[in-house]
Image (tube, rainbow, N blue to C red):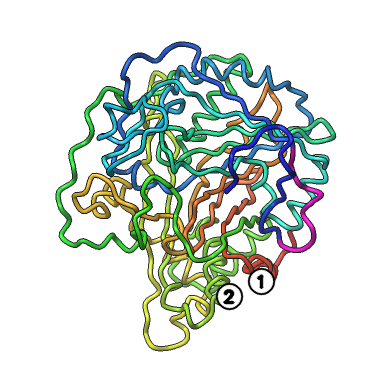
Amino acid sequence: MVVEAVSGSPPLAVGGVAGGSSMGMAVHGHRLSTVVPSSVTGEEVNYELADADLLHKLHYLRAVHVFRAPAFTIEALKEPMFPWLDLYFPVSGRLRRRHQAADAGAEGGKAVGLGRPYVRCNDCGVRIVEVACDATVEQWLQAEAERGGLCKALAYDKVIGPELFFSPLLYVQVTSFKCGGMALGFTWAHVIGDIPSAADCFSTWAQLFSGKKAPAPTLRDPLAMPPPAAPPASVAAPPPSVKATAAPVGDDWAVPGTRDMVPFSFHVTEQQLQSLQLSAAKEHQQRHVVMGPFELVSAVIWRALAAIRGPEEEEATRTVTVVRTEPATPTPGGGGGRPALANEHRIGHVVVASTGCSSSSPATADVSKLAALLAGAHLDEASAVAAAAFAGAEDADVAVYGANLTLVDAEALEVYAGLELAGRRPAHVEYAVDGVGDGGAAVVHRDGGGRGRTVAAVLRRGEADRLRAALRDALPVAA
């Protein structure tokens, strides 16, 4: 993770790009500023975090939108952010711990314990990062299609802590390409909401920018008392879909790991999906099992990574975590469905049973078998998973993404239509998860045409080239 920098910072190269030098795609000249709500939220307004929120405190969402030639000034982009943050005022706040409430305003104060975190809605604002890239948008998109993982540099890479009260919950990076194009990269603390929450929030800003009237979000009551501690679970260990960290993280909210994790992305075309579906239909006789694009693409990734990691990790690769997101369901009369800021996705796991024969290994299993397992996964609400993981504690250090290989279904989201600026649609969109454990994670969402899929993954360093080669073999139609 990088530290905050000012104008004149050295170029930031894209990490983890498979093959070739990445310096031509570097971004440089970081300039940081802050945007706050246009009105004062109030005195001593707190936004309480639910258990499901705290379950995700070590993780971050990255959303990148690349536009070919919008020619919007930074002032024009900032202007609608002031009323936008009036609607989403907790995003402008800063984290505190419950026992710190009395001296939270003391600059440089240190935590002396580990009370339950919450958001103090003190209007400290979101951080805006302006950078430049010497490549054109077309050069960037071509390199991204060939190598993958370049979008990582288009969103500011910063975790929360070790001083909670100084850490913004949202960074917005504006990258200017030499052709006049632009990229908007959002780095969103998962503790304040899941992928649909983040997408809805960004879409509201885009509506305001385009001169439309955005619907008011349905936020939880910011003055609500902290939720009561969950009753002790019957077992102290977290459910298999998540894992407790090996050691407490304190106020430095990053998943501790022993491996260097890097970004990797690739595109699955409509033709490749059709070929996968035909092949799976021949392999799998239980036609009542519905295996959609997410299950099929994820099964290919699962099988390939299990083979790459080899027999020494066979037991570990038998289990994968599944995260399924769901968009808001509008109610009659225009009201929103889910709360605007919440972690309401569903989490579960699936296991390839060990039978003592090689065919039981995910590395050699049929893609259709793995896809059927994923399609039949039992998923619980995030709040239920949090209750089991916390085992009665008010807070816990738990990894969701990367606890096992984690496969994230974001297919229901309209990630392209959700962020049109003055009628201009992005040329490329990528949603990914950062702050990932050693197991790795992959987010699957629709591409620009809606018929193919974009996969944005975080893998161990050294796995990207081998996975790309395995995908070429597994996906019969060239991308």
Mark 1 falls on what kind of element?
A: helix
Q: Please report the residue visible at 57 percent of the width from the left and 24 percent of the height from the top.
A: 34
Q: Can you identify the residue that label 1 sits on?
A: 466
243 horizontally vs 460: left or right: left
Mark 2 falls on what kind of element?
A: helix
Q: Which mark is residue 344?
A: none
What amino acid is found at the position of numbered circle 2 in the picture?
A: Ile
Comparing 41 with 358, the one in front is: 41
Rendered location of residue 263, percent (x, y): 62, 55
State whether residue 329 appears in this view: no
Highlighted magenta segment, given as a residue range: 18-28
In which quadrant of the rendered view does residue 242 lie?
A: bottom left
81 horizontally vs 428: left or right: left
Comparing 118 with 287, the one in front is: 118
Comparing 285 with 326, the one in front is: 326
80 horizontally vs 151: left or right: left
Quadrant (top left/top right/bottom left/bottom right) for the C terminus: bottom right
State whether residue 383 appears in this view: yes
Q: Is residue 23 magenta?
A: yes
Rendered location of residue 328, percent (x, y): 43, 33
Q: Is residue 127 magenta?
A: no
Q: Can you identify the residue that label 2 sits on?
A: 308
Q: Earlier in the sequence, mark 2 or mark 1?
A: 2
What amino acid is found at the position of numbered circle 1 in the picture?
A: Arg
In the rendered view, tell whether residue 379 sits above or below residue 219: below
